[in-house]
Amino acid sequence: MTGPAAARTLIGMSKTTGSRGAAAWCGLALYPVVLTLPLFGSASTLPLLRALGVTLCAVLLVGVARRMPLLALAVLLVGTLAATAAQPGSVHPSPAGGLPASGFPDGVDGRGTTLLAFLAADLVLGLLVARRPRRQWVAGVLLSLVAQGAGIAGFASPENQVALLVIALLAVLVSCMAGLVARERSEHADALRDRAVSEAVTAERLHIARELHDMVSHGIGVITMQSGVAARVVETRPAEARAALEAIEQTGRETLRGLRRALVALRRADSEADAPLAPATGLADLDALVERAAGEGVRVDLERTGAEAALPSDVDRSAYRIVQEALANVVRHAGVATCRVTVRRAERDLFLEIVDAGRGAGARSSGAGFGITGMGERVRLLHGEFSAGPRPEGGFRVAARIPLPLPGEPA
């Protein structure tokens, strides 16, 4: 995605980010105003309802908590302490009996009940531990412990202080543990995602390397051989030299077209990234490949058996590349005038076999080529089986089995 489309996407993302930021700051500005609402009302309002109202006010700080959890934690701690200080404390029965002037039943600790609103701060603390660096969340834990301890010591009735301190400590520990677990899972997911990206990049590099190798090495090999023939017969047999030069020109043009198509595919936009990298070659092009091998001095006996139905594109292209690379090895290294290519299609498998009676593996292992490696990688990517090696009776054999999907089954 480039050009105007990318610009529009960036503008849309910036607008969305700006609107979310404005909403977060608006919530922060409204929080102290809304926090005072639960503190008003009749004197008979239960302390638990007031504490619930103070706790629900924390919803206004969700946007700030996602962006700056440490700031949201500090605001919640200060707001809860302020709301607790505004509440009436423990009361005793009035001399005439019934409810006292504060409206709370006998022995109810209004301030201590409001301190339960610290649970909202504990949730933000868990978010801080899960998302922020160690320095920030350690500061948040210390700040939460100090604020909650000071609030309980200063506002709770003496008989409730121990219980509230235990509850506050356990709530902080639970929040820290939940945040650490979430942090570990997030880091593990990030590691898996990075590994998947790395493996995808490596697989794509191997795919490009195989395509370029199969595309270029065959053409360069033909050009090298034909140029050698032309150099040897240019003076004695001009007609053969001219034919060799024409073959060089044709092969060079085909190789250049293939390279151009591959480079265009690599530079293609994201919307077309699923298009195949290489030209749409397949087993239907084997006849042309056999003719080119004959022009290079190797007669190929091609045998096809089985159904003629269309193959999945990846199987078709990979099978063609395997035969192409195997024939290129025969032309370069085998030192024979004939070879046999068998393409047999069964109900569930495609079998390929390329056999020659040449020099075997000695000449093929003398260089540092990647042809056999690339063929094996292609077959394994298609969950097939591959083998390449010398024959007991002499020569070399390349064989592959590629599984095929059933009709109507996804490829």
Image (cartoon, rainbow, N blue to C red):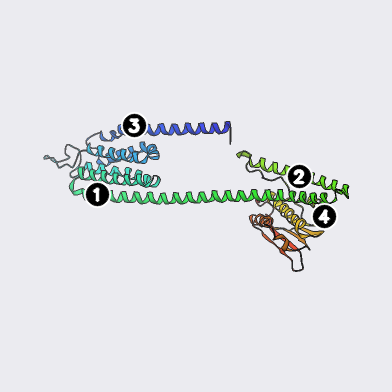
Q: Amino acid at mark 3?
A: Ala
On-image quarter of the N terminus: top right
**Mark 2 vs mark 4, CA separation in Å:** 18 Å
Q: Which numbered disc covers residue 29?
A: 3
Quadrant assignment, res 374: bottom right
Q: Are marks 3 and 1 in contact (CB under 8 Å)?
A: no
Q: Which numbered disc covers residue 53?
A: none
Disc 4, SS: loop
Marks 3, 4: nearer the viewer: 4
Q: Which circle's residue, 2 or 4, is located before the other in the chain? A: 2
Badge 3: residue crowd in 10 Å (few <14, some 14–19, many ≥20): few
Badge 4: residue crowd in 10 Å (few <14, some 14–19, many ≥20): some
Marks 2, 3: nearer the viewer: 2
Q: Which circle's residue, 4 or 1, is located before the other in the chain? A: 1
**Mark 4 vs mark 1, CA separation in Å:** 92 Å
Q: Amino acid at mark 1?
A: Leu
Residue at image location 32% in from the left, 51% down from the top: 173
Asked whether 37 or 275 is in front, the reply is 275
Image side of residue 286 versus residue 54, left or right: right
**Mark 2 vs mark 1, CA separation in Å:** 83 Å
Disc 1, SS: helix
The residue labelled by disc 4 is: 297
Q: Which numbered disc covers residue 165?
A: 1
**Mark 3 vs mark 1, CA separation in Å:** 31 Å
The residue labelled by disc 2 is: 252
Q: Which circle's residue, 2 or 1, is located before the other in the chain? A: 1
